[in-house]
Image: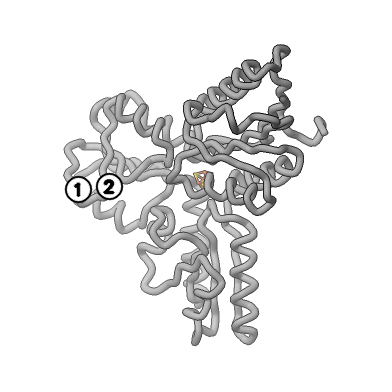
Amino acid sequence: MKITLARALGTCFGVHDAIEAAQDESFRDNLTIIGELVHNPQTVAALRAKGVRMVRSMDDQITTKNVMITAHGAPASMKKALEARGYRVYDASCPLVLKVHNRVARLVSEGYFPVVIGQRDHVEVRGIVGDLAEYEVILEPEETARLAGRSKIGIVCQTTQQVETAQRIVAAIRERFPGVDVKFVDTICQPTKDRQAAVRDLVDEVDLMIVVGGYNSANTKKLKRVCDEKGVEAHHIESAGELEPSWFRGKLHVGITAGTSTPHEIIAEVHDRIREISRRAGGADGAQVSRHDNTSR
Ligand code: SF4
């Protein structure tokens, strides 16, 4: 059985840097993270084991001097409020999330009504819209009806949205409001686009795809959706222990992809476990392993 890793997969630089920062010795036993730093249960558990505390919101009880805003970002007003309460705030917002904040602010200053293509309840989206007087968050083309009456519409995306979803919604807005000035700023981040493009390239070559990432990770779910849309069998798992040998029966080529919150160690464990399953199933010579890129095709 051949096993191929998608050419782009796993932890992005934004998540990586935030995890590194949270583990800095200077914060030892004196750091509370507001919200989930990453959508990955293993990483969250490892941080807790190192004495890092986590709360759901800034209004929960915080007993440390240092507080951290996660890579997903937060409204500027929240940072100010925390400082006003006497906390030392470490802002681990990803620069690509801050870029969305800046682009929205510019659209508003130019007179556009701001629209975010994304999940209304996602912490990143709450951070983007948190300081706006008015806005809409849209995820389905039917929801574009809510934009009636606007003369200028400025659109950005949650960084981890699927490219096709954004294109579909922008097209729906332009079609529904042909006379309106619609400006679209594509803020889907490059690491997300790279992972989506990599899985799209690989999915046509495999007969099974393993998608690794937290069940609460939106971008991991989107990678699985790409496989579903292509009609290729895919399983979303959080860890190697969930792999079922029966999935691999009769399969000749298995692909592996992973969301932007998935640590590379977990991908390596999944990869090793699939090799073991393959060996036990009779592939005594072991699995053939490759990394998917243009030169290996
Ligand atoms: S997914 Fe993109 S925006 Fe989010 S932390 Fe990673 S690089 Fe930054």
Q: Amino acid at mark 1?
A: Asp
**Residue 41 percent coordinates (x, y):** 39, 35
Residue annotated with mark 2:
56
Quadrant of image for the C terminus:
top right
Vertical position of residue 99 compared to residue 271: above or below: below
Relative placement, left or right, of 282 versus 133 is right
Q: Amino acid at mark 2?
A: Arg
**Residue 47 percent coordinates (x, y):** 34, 29
> Residue 235 lies in what quarter of the image?
top right
Residue annotated with mark 1:
60
- Label 2 CB, ligand 1: below 8 Å? no
**Residue 288 percent coordinates (x, y):** 73, 21
- Label 1 CB, ligand 1: below 8 Å? no
Cα–Cα span, label 1 and label 2: 7 Å
Q: Residue at x 53, y 51 (%)?
A: 160
Q: Residue at x 62, y 16 (%)?
A: 280
